[in-house]
Amino acid sequence: MGRKAREKLIRTAVEPRVETAIEAAPPAAAEWSWREWTIVAFLIAITLAVFRQLASHAFLNFDDGQFIYENQHVLHGDVGWALTSAEIGWYPLTWLSHMVDVAVWGQRAGMHLLTGLLLHVISAILLFLAMRRLTRAVWPAAFVAALFAIHPMHVESVAWASERKDTLSTLLAMLALWLYARAPWRMLGVSIALALSLMAKQMYITLPFVFLLLDVWPLERLRTFDDLRQRAVEKWPLFVLAIAGVAAAIIGQSNLKAVHSTTSLPVGDRIANALIACSSYFVKLFIPVDMAVPYPLMRVGFSAAIIPFLVLAAITIVVVAARRSAPFLFAGWFWFLGTLVPVIGIVAIGNQSMADRYTYFSYVGLFIAITFGVIVLAKRLRIPDAALAAIAGIAVAGYAAVAMHQVGYWKDSETLFTHTLAVTRDNSIAEYLLGQTLQSAKPDAAIIHLRRAIDLTQPLLQIPDATTPDWYPQAYVGIGTATLMKARPMPQSPARDALIGEAITSFGKALEIDPSAAHAKNNIGVAMQILPASSPTSMQLRYDAHLTSGTFLSQQGRFDQAVAEFRSAVEIFPKSVEAHIYLGLGLLQANKKPEGIAELRAARELDAKQANAILSKALHLPADERNFDGFIEQAMR
């Protein structure tokens, strides 16, 4: 070999090798064997064992109606609406999946829930495949997937039919994760999976950042700031999709009236709630107790968030300091925190302080950090693998037992919200939902819960610029309905008539808050039909009901119907000054001037002084004995 050839060989041997993207990819996973098949079979078996009760569960009166059994678009398979509408959130793939379920299963709640369970099982398997490929550690990957499958905090996402958007979007996010694990430099398949996930629910706008964390560990593709720039540029399609997802989420949640700027809390209180929620999620990972839906949003002083803040800050400092020696802690911890950002509550969405379903994907980061952290610690302490496997088995069995018990609370609305009220306090929404559930079967108990919901909400409505929750007028409708249910079986008596009168008053209060309150107007009609026509009490109640109904119809611009109600009031008490005045005003609104003026004159002939007082009050006029004549003169022009 000549001198030049020898120098070239030496130069080639010592020159640093430039690592290409393909070379930096994770090596091919080990061959699939009986071990992997056993793990997949175990994941399926334990998940089905935990959630098998779902087949006998019922729909809930919390969101399931608007998403499934009362949604006419879903019931009639309106595909165009599913693809384009954002009136209650833009979830086209979720709507389509609900439509398929309705077409196949009708309104059998258990079968809808089993579909969600199937999606959950597939997500667990995809997570195992992705972690196996990323870490080349089969048993740790299996443990992470098992925790995802059966952790009690994940029951809400699977056992609630309305959360199909959660299980479906997560399955597609897990698919993106698996595709990324196979080829992190190929963005086409990952981008398609993320786009589909965002079409099910705009939850995974943080997924590009999760992939950057995986580039830190276990892929080791991100060591310098230049690496960060390259990896970020590589993922530009994912960031574009994330921005589009944010826009879709804001539009959808605004249409759903879930973004509150008033009934929710000031920014400082929301930050405090976010810190407390994060620490609660962390604690419930290890001690999953007192799980509920919804958790009430309450005002807390920032002092209550100091300890949670210090705990979270301390953990963050530790994992950052250990990022080189234990990068899995860094990746897992920031996976947990980062994926909670869209739902942590600093941007006010809904009236809950936290939700178990928000941990559905974020807990995976903690599962990873804990699993690989324990493995490293066990090696340092020389704990045998058999002992470690036994501990893992006990953990999975314990979580499965707790989760199975938690699934039982989701069998129907009464069971779920009774449990929620047992483990939370001052929970107005749960009080309302339980009261609504009980209004027919247990009316006395329903009235107690509905009044409690109203009492808890009224102080919040005193906050400047506060908006009324959508359910608030329906609480009065529920009280009225429960009161009617109490009255129906009673024999005819003044006490029965009094109950019916209370019901009509409650329906009227609902209409006063919201003139379009569902069922309030119809229920007034039902109450009036069961009142006997002869007794003085019932006549007074019917009279009041007609005036109340006419007033609300007038406020809605339905003048002809209002006039009909006022005429009915006059027929009951022909000598009522008030009835003639309201009939006269109604006729004027209906553009029937001669008849309206005649009714007003009839009222004046019955009692001129009283007529002037009632008209002045109805029109919010200052006290003046000439108001009545002046109004008639003006009306005649």
Image (cartoon, rainbow, N blue to C red):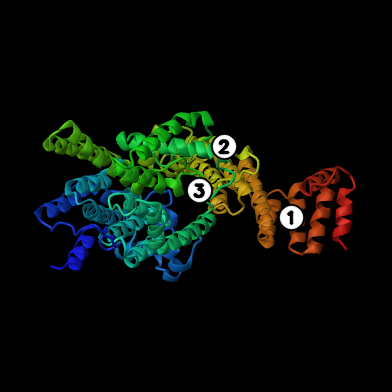
Residue toward you, 438 or 391: 391
The answer to whether the residue labelled 1 contacts the one labelled 3, judged by CB atoms less than 8 Å apart, is no
Residue furthest front in the image: 3
Residue 553 image offset from top left, x and y in percent: 65, 56
Separation (CA) of disc 1 from disc 3: 45 Å
Horizontally, is 446 left or right of 159 in the view?
right
Which quarter of the picture shows residue 412? top left
Separation (CA) of disc 1 from disc 2: 29 Å
What residue is rendered at 23% in x and 61% in y?
11
Of tags 1 and 2, the one toward the viewer is 1
The residue identified by callout 1 is: 583
Asked which secondary structure carries label 1, the reply is: helix
* Amino acid type shown at disc 3: Ile
Judge whether 633 appears above or below 527 on screen. below
* Amino acid type shown at disc 1: Leu
* Amino acid type shown at disc 2: Pro
Residue 572 image offset from top left, x and y in percent: 68, 50
Asked which secondary structure carries label 3, the reply is: loop
The residue identified by callout 2 is: 494
Horizontally, is 47 left or right of 496 in the view?
left
Horizontally, is 46 left or right of 495 in the view?
left
The label shown at residue 349 is 3
